[in-house]
Amino acid sequence: MNKKIILAISGSMRKPSFTEKMLDLCIEGMGENVEVRKFYPHKMNIGPCTSCWSCWGKKTPGVCVQKDDFQEILEAYKQADYFLLAAPLYIFSFPATVKNVIDRFFITLEPAQVKSARGGTEHPKRFDRHPKTVLISSCGFPEIENFDLLRPYFRKICDEMGWTWSGEILISAAGIAGAPKLFDRKYELIKKAGAELREGSISKETTDEIAAPAMSAEDYRKMATASFSGGIIDKIKTISIAMKAMREAEKKS
């Protein structure tokens, strides 16, 4: 059996990265017989799309005039069965380095304008690739509604690029990740999401359970505020709030 190719974009500039941990857990859940091609846009030399339209010209259709590292991503894309895009929420959207990569996928479109099966207008697609695509993201605010702009935006991108939208893995209140045990259940669910993706797509039930809050928004705000203060008293406060959430989680389990 041929290995399935996973194109993975790890868009967090932090190290260690919680968002990348989410990405890796999803890939782990997808099991064996996969080949992962992971890229870090912030570590690569990738220029912005200049809208020169050279890739739409007759001389070199589908070839970008910029000879930079995006070519590595494009070559992986041409073989990809899955496209996992992992990026933290930056001002309710993608980090600039990730948006830059998305813009460069302009090269996968042809210049003609045709009627879309969804209504409206679209461009025909090059390379005949329609990878199963998943959005993986985290944010520092506690409310899952902070993804309300990114979610439809990414689905629109998938529709227009010919990518097969296959689910999302979203976690708010990502600052809890440093507290022991609170996210253990989420980590197992992310691996379950990977297994579901391998079989088809990530279920809404799994997505919703991953997104469920691990503590109250008020407690999280207090903990996040204290963690950035850095004093001894604030560290004790952070630990106390985390322990309270752990006790409450144990009561529910």
Image: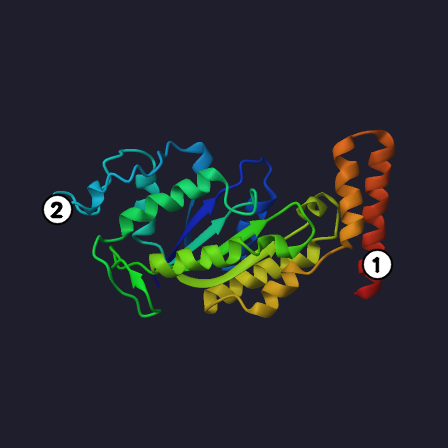
Query: Can you tell which quarter of the image residue 64 is in?
Result: top left
Q: In this view of the protein, which residue sits in the foreground, 190 or 14?
A: 14
Question: Mark 1, residues whose alpha carbon is within 10 Å: few (<14), some, or many (≥20)?
Answer: few
Q: In this view of the protein, which residue sits in the foreground, 228 or 29?
A: 228
Q: Is residue 186 above or below residue 204?
A: above
Side of 163 relative to 220 (left or right):
left
In the image, which disc is placed on residue 58?
2
* Residue type at tag 1: Glu
**Visible residue check, residue 134:** no
Q: Secondary structure at mark 2?
A: loop
Q: Secondary structure at mark 1?
A: helix
**Visible residue check, residue 35:** yes
Side of 218 relative to 211 (left or right):
right
Residue 208 location, x and y as percent? 62, 65
* Residue type at tag 2: Lys
Q: In this view of the protein, which residue sits in the foreground, 73 or 204?
A: 204
In the image, which disc is placed on residue 214?
none
Side of 215 relative to 128 (left or right):
right
Residue 198 location, x and y as percent? 46, 64
Considering only order in the chain, which callout, 1 or 2, is on the residue closer to the N terminus? 2
Specify the farthest residue to the left. 59
Question: Mark 2, residues whose alpha carbon is within 10 Å: few (<14), some, or many (≥20)?
Answer: few
Which quadrant is the C terminus positioned in? Answer: bottom right
Question: What separation in Å lies between label 2 and label 1 (alpha carbons)?
Answer: 64 Å
Residue 111 location, x and y as percent? 22, 52
Residue displayed at 76% across by 52% down: 217
Side of 193 relative to 153 (left or right):
right
Which quadrant is the N terminus positioned in? Answer: bottom left
Residue at image mark 1: 248
Residue displayed at 54% across by 56% down: 26
Q: In this view of the protein, which residue sits in the foreground, 181 or 174?
A: 174
CB within 8 Å, label 2 to label 1: no
